[in-house]
Amino acid sequence: MNVESTTMDERRASRRMTDLPMQGLLNRLKTDEALMLAYGRGDCDAFERLYLRHKDSLFAYLYRSCPRSAVVEELAQDTWMAVINAAPGYEPRAKFRTWLYQIAHHRLVDFWRRKDNRHEPLDDVTQDRLQDNKATIDREALSGQLMQAIAKLPEDQREALLLQEQGFSIHDIGAITDTGVETIKSRLRYARIRLRQLMGEQA
């Protein structure tokens, strides 16, 4: 037996075993934009990682904009289908997350143009699903009173507020909604004032 050859083989095997978790770590650390580009080249695992990263927060945003579980499921599916269809020609001109929510915003606008702009009561099953996502949704914001108050805000104010709660900057919100920064600031200011009034009325 060639001892040197055996030792080299063991080293290679050890290196491969070490590389496996390291490769997984590198994949998890990839930016959204890099994952989307990889998906455009045919890497389906890249899309799965993107989807898992953003599906819950996107669902929460859509649900709090329109608390109807069946509608939200459809809007979320349409949003992700738009991402899939855009993959071959995707270019990272903006952050992937900003682009994703811009697509969702347009789906919401189209929905409210087609439907009567009224909110139905909160769906218990969907609320439980939201409560499971404690990392991205504030528990207080899930209270029935606050949800009802947010639903009563004008649509443009409600959306600006919900996007800010998702961690977007004022400039990002402007890009998502195609609105000027000063207008976004004004919408957020009036949304908070109105929200305090509504919560005071419900207290």
Image (cartoon, rainbow, N blue to C red):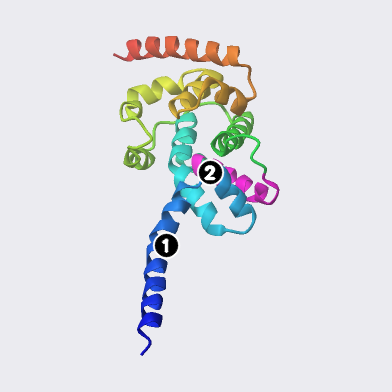
Quick check: is 179 in the magenta stretch?
A: no
Report the disc number at residue 46.
none
Residue neighbourhood size for the residue with mark 1, other residues' Cα within 10 Å, grouped as few (<14), some (14–19), many (≥20): few
Mark 1 highlights which residue? 19
Quick check: is 85 in the magenta stretch?
A: yes
Residue depicted at 38% across the width and 37% down the height: 123
- In the depicted structure, whether residue 54 falls above or below residue 147: below
Tell me, yes or no, whether the two marked residues, 2 and 1, touch with CB atoms within 8 Å: no
Kindly indicate the quadrant of the structure image that contains residue 143: top left
Of discs 2 and 1, which sits in the foreground? 1
Residue closest to the eye, 52 or 26: 26
- Residue 82 point in image, percent of width and height: 63, 45
Mark 2 highlights which residue? 32
- Residue 113 point in image, percent of width and height: 64, 29
User: In whole angstroms, how far apart are the C-alphas of marks 2 and 1?
Assistant: 22 Å
Judge left or right: residue 116 versus residue 193.
right
- The three-letter amino acid code for the residue at tag 1 is Asp
- Residue 176 point in image, percent of width and height: 60, 28
